[in-house]
Image (cartoon, grey):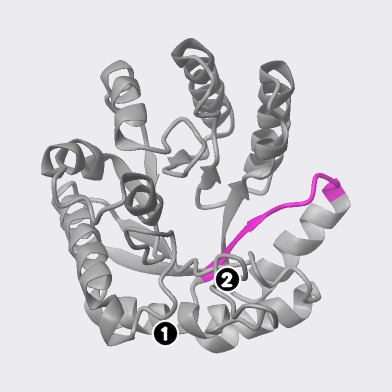
Amino acid sequence: MRIEVFAAHWGNNDLPPEVFIDKVAAAGFDGIEMSLPLDAALREEWTDRIAKAGLQLIAAQWETVFHSDFELHRAALAELLDNACLARPVLVNTHTGKDFYTQAQNAELIDLAAAISAKHGVPIVHELHRSRFSGHPMLLLPYLAQYPELPLTADLSHWCCACESLLEDQPHTLAQVLPLVRHVHARVGHAQGPQVADFRAPEAKPALDAHLAWWDAIVALRRAAGAERMTFTPEFGPAPYTQTLPYTQQPVSDAWEQNVAMLQLLRQRYPTD
């Protein structure tokens, strides 16, 4: 099974496309995870540049966060997922629904995503993320009863924050969720937040070890299932995800450096079969 590691565009949005793509390739990533412009010409400019650099693409959809009204959210989700699938990415990672929508409303959005995925032949996976339908284990589990094969992106840093723990007391929940994971956001969270200051620091070791154990289990499950690839995106984000000093707002660490260091850790830990 191939382990492929993607660079997050998040936090690098100020860079021109060619500068960011060169930076990604030089660091040794396999591809880029990003939200694509709705303008077809701009979308194709990005996808052409990425392909010419020998990189792969994971498309991301998160902009539905701006639509709290359900009808507007549903319309935006359809437009954004269609646009993402037109780029023919490896997969589409989506922030789906809201934690305050009814189960029927969120289920309608899950069904919509499944229909768009089938239409384009592109996998669409739903990210575990605060404020979405999957923002807490007890929010997600009813949907797993309804959709036992629901494809997920594991960003378990959000659940650490939401549950104020490293999920030590929820092995039964993880046993239901980890087999459904098709993509991982490799950020390390902790009981009081979604991102440690530096995952290499000794004080972050308990959190890092917990995340590595989850990722090990996911990789083992995908290998056992005969999957050809497993994808990871190191996703340490800019401020305010990166902690800052008071008054000066100076970041205490460099998110890009963290992501490259996580790339190197993943390469060492999960050699390709």
In the rendered image, residue 252 lying in the magenta stretch gets the answer no
Label 1 vs 2, first from the N-terminus: 2
**Distance of mark 1 from mark 2, alpha carbons?**
19 Å
The amino acid at mark 2 is Leu
Q: Which of 207 and 152 is in front in this view?
A: 207
Is 134 placed left or right of 59 in the picture? left
Query: Residue 19 lies in what quarter of the image?
Result: bottom right
The local crowd at label 1, few if under 14, some if 14 to 19, many if 20 or more residues have their Cα within 10 Å, is some
Please give the range of residues in magenta. 31-40
What residue would you read off at disc 2? 55
- Residue shown at 57% from the left, 71% from the top: 55
Q: Which element is circle 1 on?
A: helix
The local crowd at label 2, few if under 14, some if 14 to 19, many if 20 or more residues have their Cα within 10 Å, is some
- Residue shown at 72% from the left, 52% from the top: 36
Q: Residue 261 carries which label?
A: 1
Query: Residue 216 lies in what quarter of the image?
Result: bottom left
The amino acid at mark 1 is Ala
Residue 273 visible, this orientation: no
Find residue 185 and report its horizontal and vertical position in percent.
42, 59
